[in-house]
């Protein structure tokens, strides 16, 4: 499985990848789109966003999104994110 | 501006190819891709389409002369957005370079669809546009040609690498089913053995 751009994120990233790959073949392609890996994804994403800020790549990505938007990007709506952080609190 | 187009048929089902697509890296043929990150991902509640936004971190292996023009950085970043429709069985991936895009823009679109003539295989289509910016006007043709050649080489190598990933996954699947077969066989043998002792 591929590494993350943030060395410290690779472990959680690969856990998430494993979960997603299994979900993709065993659930999604069989017609069940119920999310299964959200907790892992939020943890991974938290680490990733921190790394992107450190490497100053966040603005580069934000600019690219302006030109070529990613529909319903969950980074702009924090609804699902707050759900996971509320679980932690 | 230069254009690149390629088509290929993978002798694997769409489900196998798209599953392998998420696991394409790392592969020995593409050591320049050093990290792949998922920036965002969700299933559209209305259409059921799986959308993914990824960031690929790559090592530049361009010659010193080209690197000099392109800013000299050894790392480059590529953003990929994809839409995967499980109903129509179509995966569309669009990529654009994030670094150096003021001097050079490469836009690529890849689609994976079921081969209408043979459902057990998958059609791959790749299109790319390469545009060197005005800052390079004197050299833009050279840069574009260089990038086109490099893109063509990388595309072929990338497909070969992907074939290897598909083969590996296929082998893993076969081994898993062989284990199942041998487990069933040994269960059958022990059942026979069991019946013999009876």
Image: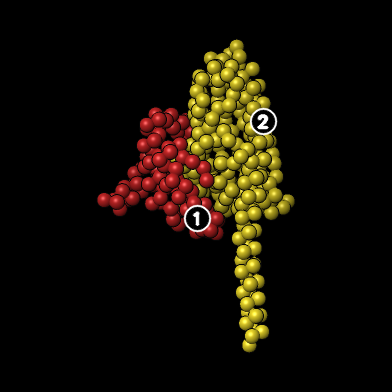
Both labels 1 and 2 in a single chain: no
Residue A21 visible in image: yes
Taking the spot 31% from the left edge, 48% from the top edge, the residue there is A85
Q: Which residue: 45% across, 50% down?
A: A15
Q: Is residue B99 above or below residue B141?
A: below
How many numbered marks does the figure carry? Answer: 2
Q: Secondary structure at mark 1?
A: helix
Badge 2 local density, few (<14 within 10 Å), some, or many (20+)? Answer: some
Q: Residue at x 38, y 38 (%)?
A: A49
Q: Nearer the viewer, residue B171 or A17?
A: B171
Q: Residue B21, position in %: x, y?
A: 58, 45
In the picture, the disc for residue A23 is 1
Q: Nearer the viewer, residue B21 or B186?
A: B186
Examine the rendered structure and indicate whether residue A81 appears above or below residue B179.
Answer: above
Describe residue B88's horizontal placement relative to residue B38 as left or right.
Answer: right
Looking at this rendering, what residue extends furthest in the right direction?
A: B117
Residue sitting farthest toward the front: B197
Pick out the residue farthest to the bottom. Answer: B198
Q: Position of residue B83 (x, y in %)?
A: 53, 44
Within 10 angstroms of label 1, few (less than 14), some, or many (20 or more) residues? Answer: some
Question: Taking B107 as reference, is B42 left or right?
Answer: left
Indicate the chain on which mark 2 is placed: B
Element type at mark 2: helix
Q: Which chain is red?
A: A
Residue B101 in the image, given as x and y percentages of width and height: 51, 24
User: Which chain did the image draw in yellow?
Assistant: B
Write down the quadrant of residue B187 in the picture: bottom right
Location of mark 2 (residue): B152
Q: Nearer the viewer, residue B50 or B72?
A: B72
> Mark 1 belongs to which subunit?
A
């Amino acid at each position: 499985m591929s590494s993350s751009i943030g060395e410290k994120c690779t472990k959680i990233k690969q856990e998430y990848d494993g979960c997603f790959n299994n979900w993709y073949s065993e659930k999604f392609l069989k017609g069940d789109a119920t999310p299964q890996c959200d907790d892992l994804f939020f943890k991974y994403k938290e680490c990733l966003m921190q790394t992107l800020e450190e490497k100053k790549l966040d603005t580069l990505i934000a600019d690219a999104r302006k030109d070529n938007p990613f529909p319903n990007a969950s980074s702009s709506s924090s609804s699902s994110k707050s759900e996971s952080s509320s679980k932690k609190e | 501006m230069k254009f690149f187009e390629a088509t290929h048929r993978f002798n694997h089902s769409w489900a196998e190819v798209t599953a392998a697509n998420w696991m394409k890296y790392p592969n020995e043929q593409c050591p320049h891709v050093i990290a792949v990150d998922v920036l965002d991902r969700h299933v559209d509640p209305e259409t059921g389409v799986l959308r993914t936004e990824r960031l690929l971190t790559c090592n530049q292996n361009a010659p010193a002369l080209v690197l000099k023009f392109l800013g000299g950085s050894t790392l480059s970043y590529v953003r990929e957005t994809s839409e995967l429709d499980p109903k129509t069985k179509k995966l569309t991936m669009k990529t654009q370079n994030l670094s150096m895009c003021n001097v050079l823009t490469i836009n690529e679109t890849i689609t994976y669809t079921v081969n209408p003539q043979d459902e057990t295989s998958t059609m791959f289509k790749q299109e790319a546009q390469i545009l060197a910016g005005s800052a390079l006007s004197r050299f833009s043709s050279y840069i574009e040609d260089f990038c086109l050649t490099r893109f063509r080489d990388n595309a072929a190598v990338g497909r070969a690498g992907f074939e290897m990933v598909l083969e590996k996954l296929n082998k893993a699947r076969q081994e898993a089913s062989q284990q199942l077969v041998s487990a069933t066989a040994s269960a059958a043998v022990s059942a026979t053995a069991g019946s013999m002792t009876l």
